Image: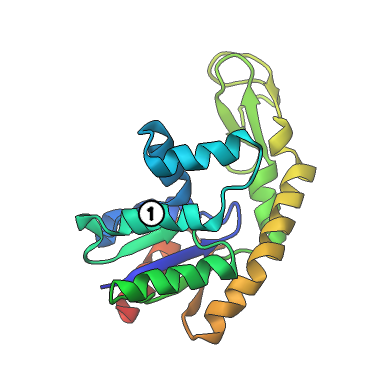
Amino acid sequence: MPFVVLMGGPGAGKGTQARQLKETLGLPQIATGDLFRENLQNETELGKLAKRYMDAGELVPDEVTVAMVKERLSRPDCANGALLDGFPRTIAQARALDQLLAEMGERISLVPYIHVDPDVLLRRLAGRWTCRANGHVFHLIFNPPKEPGICDYDGSPLYQRADDSEETQKRRIEVYFEQTAPLLDYYRDRGLLVEIDGEQDIEQVHRDLVAAIQKAS
């Protein structure tokens, strides 16, 4: 029963691959962002607790996030494993996850890391432009508009959102590597980390991920 922690920097294609792996392997995708939204919308006890911290402008403590993950893993669809996306982010969370799975009589099978050079990540992230009228999204490299600066669909001007700027995305990438380097070493030292070349086409990355997970299961 594979419990897999999928890792990759912003722009590495982790979300796309997680959705495809869910379809191919039948593993539920557990993303902490989705868990937070679900608990907040349903006004669960954990959701109310998280909201108190968020309303106060504070970080939600690890124990609240871990409790949400624990509740999600207890559901029947996780009986045969799960794909963790966006969790853990720190060594403390990784240890909490290890303990949580041990209580279930399980353990992490594999930690695939979709590796993409930071310069490539920046090219992927910083090329997004959005149309002012209806929010259509273009990318200067992967999906350029037919006419520079003009939306193909409604002719409105394109602009770059502040959070899509090169400077913002460069810092986002730097923060990711600063925060997750210790986590990569943690799993590497335990022989669980396998690096996947994320600069290949999407289909090949998917094939490599499936092969690695099936080998470890």
Q: Position of residue 47 (x, y in %)?
A: 43, 40
Residue 28 visible in the shown view: yes
Q: Quadrant of residue 71?
A: bottom left
Label 1: few (<14), some (14–19) or many (≥20) C-alpha neighbours in 10 Å? many
Q: Position of residue 40 (x, y in %)?
A: 43, 35
Q: Which residue is mark 1?
A: 30
Disc 1 marks a residue whose amino acid type is Ile
Residue 203 visible in the shown view: no
Question: Residue 125, relative to residue 156: is it above or below?
Answer: below
Please indicate whether residue 42 sits to the left or right of residue 76 in the image. Answer: right
Residue under the point 67% across and 63% down: 179
Where disc 1 sits, the SS reads strand
Question: Toward the viewer: 168 or 50?
Answer: 50
Question: Residue 98, relative to residue 39: is it above or below?
Answer: below
Please indicate whether residue 1 sits to the left or right of residue 206 in the image. Answer: left
Where, quadrant-wise, is the N terminus in this rendering?
bottom left
Residue under the point 60% across and 58% down: 9
Question: Toward the viewer: 77 or 174?
Answer: 77
Where, quadrant-wise, is the C terminus in this rendering?
bottom left
Please indicate whether residue 206 sits to the left or right of residue 114 in the image. Answer: left
Residue under the point 36% across and 59% down: 70
Residue under the point 59% across and 71% down: 183
Q: Position of residue 207 (x, y in %)?
A: 37, 67
